[in-house]
């Protein structure tokens, strides 16, 4: 009997691992409502986003998820079922609409009684909520710690270890509830990187985990987040990824060079690419950044290895990411206030002077550098060893 149980347990392990890996074999790509619409988001905005993903070519470029962030929730009915607020008259119909476009739909909640925006959370309703999401046809859940932090503090005052155990358990609980529905639902952990989430995120079923506080649409915020990811590459793999937060590309407060840095760095980081702009008002430049096929291919490379920092000297940083075909993506980043020349640190990258170099944002350039890198800008290269 014991042997049978053991054999069954061993059989169950790889199956569970495969399901989790399959759902996020490469980092998730899609759109999320928060960065542009915040709490104003409506059913109509989400439908429009789905329409625009298709009509702009974003869907064909790989942006598949349409994720509703905070502010869709109403109260619970007398049986405790979560009911959307008046901005979302019929969640099932919305999910059907998104699916009819060949896209997937995501939703947002958290383990606390309230979400960050003060809306109803899943506290003590985890199974019920997971079932409801599955009934609606939800494919992705972003689960945001927020007010559960207060519960942790109340239940284990001053005991950080216990509080963190509670946090892990809260995520595991929702993971199990999602699994129990039988519907594959991508599980996105959002707790701002606390307790080095990259070390335990996969064990509680996370397909990705936020590594930092919220991004804002300015160079300081974006670059502080992006460049702080050094050293985290070993924690990412197919099925579970570091998430330095959603994209701000196209929201208007950074210039083209800064947005190209944002997109290049996120691709080298194998980060989820969740556009956060108004898709119905994209400039040609925004489209060219979000839909650059080669940058997306770096992010989505099937080898599934996150890149990392190679060197940092003053305002200059060099990052690289190994790719499946044996080549490497290299970003030469200038964090300074003046355009400056940068060269490839050939030795550090294990390259010879004769390596074949492709300049991603400037494909007509066939030089071997040095390159003039603009203020806050990047030169992104794919190099055959
Ligand atoms: C937190 C998250 C954000 C967003 C908001 C919504 O701040 O980190 O990404 O989901 O909550 O209230």
Image: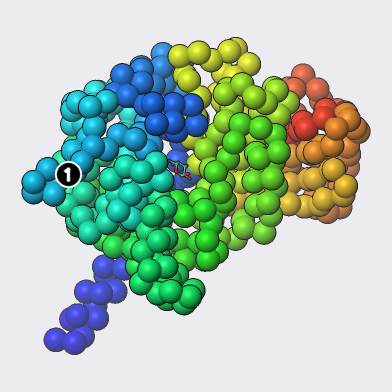
Q: Where does residue 45 sit, x and y in percent of width and height?
A: 36, 21
Q: Position of residue 66 (x, y in %)?
A: 37, 31
Task: Tell me: 183 left or right of 254.
Answer: left
Quadrant in the picture for residue 370: top right
Residue matched to label 1? 76
Q: Is residue 370 left or right of residue 42?
A: right
Q: Is residue 285 left or right of residue 181?
A: right
Extreme residue toward the bottom, this view = 2
Q: Position of residue 215 (x, y in %)?
A: 58, 40
Task: Please tell me which residue is depicted at 33% across the width and 56% down the height of the picture.
Answer: 111
Front residue of this view, candidates 70 and 104: 70
Nearest the viewer among 59 and 208 is 208
Measuring 17% from the left and 44% from the top, which residue is drawn there?
76
Q: Quadrant of ligand 1?
A: top left
Residue 227 is situated, as x and y percent measured from the top left of the image, at 70, 47
| Residue at image location 57% in from the left, 30% down from the top | 248
């Amino acid at each position: 009997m014991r042997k049978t149980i053991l054999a069954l347990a061993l059989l169950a392990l790889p199956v569970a691992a495969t399901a989790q890996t399959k759902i996020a074999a490469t980092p998730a790509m899609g759109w999320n409502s928060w960065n542009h619409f915040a709490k104003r988001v409506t059913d109509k905005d989400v439908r429009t986003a789905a329409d625009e993903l298709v009509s702009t070519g974003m869907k064909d470029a790989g942006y598949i998820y349409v994720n509703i962030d905070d502010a869709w929730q109403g109260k619970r009915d007398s049986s405790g079922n979560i009911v959307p607020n008046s901005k979302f008259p019929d969640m099932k119909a919305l999910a059907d609409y998104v699916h009819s476009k060949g896209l997937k739909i995501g939703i947002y909640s958290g383990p606390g009684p309230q979400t960050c925006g003060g809306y109803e959370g899943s506290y003590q309703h985890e199974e019920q909520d997971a079932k409801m999401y599955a009934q609606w046809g939800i494919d992705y859940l972003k689960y945001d710690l927020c007010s559960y932090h207060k519960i942790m503090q109340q239940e284990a005052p001053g005991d950080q270890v216990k509080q963190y155990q509670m946090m892990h358990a809260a995520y595991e609980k929702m993971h199990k509830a999602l699994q129990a529905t039988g519907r594959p639902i991508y599980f996105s952990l959002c707790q701002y990187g606390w307790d080095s989430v990259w070390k335990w995120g996969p064990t509680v079923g996370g397909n990705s985990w936020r590594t930092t506080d919220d991004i804002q649409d300015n160079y300081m915020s974006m670059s502080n987040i992006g460049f702080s990811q050094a050293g985290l590459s070993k924690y990412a793999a197919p099925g579970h990824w570091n998430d330095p937060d959603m994209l701000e590309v196209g929201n208007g407060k950074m210039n083209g060079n800064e947005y190209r840095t944002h997109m290049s760095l996120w691709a080298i980081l194998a980060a989820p690419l969740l556009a956060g702009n108004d898709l119905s008002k994209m400039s040609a430049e925004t489209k060219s950044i979000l839909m650059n096929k080669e940058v997306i291919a770096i992010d989505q490379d099937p080898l599934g290895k996150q890149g990392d920092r190679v060197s940092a000297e003053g305002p200059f940083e060099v990052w690289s990411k190994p790719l499946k075909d044996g080549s490497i993506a290299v970003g030469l980043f200038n964090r300074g206030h003046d355009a400056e020349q940068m060269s490839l640190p050939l030795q550090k990258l294990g390259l010879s002077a004769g390596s074949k170099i492709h300049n991603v944002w400037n494909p007509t350039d066939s030089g071997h550098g040095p390159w003039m890198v603009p203020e806050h800008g990047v030169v992104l290269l794919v190099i055959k060893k």
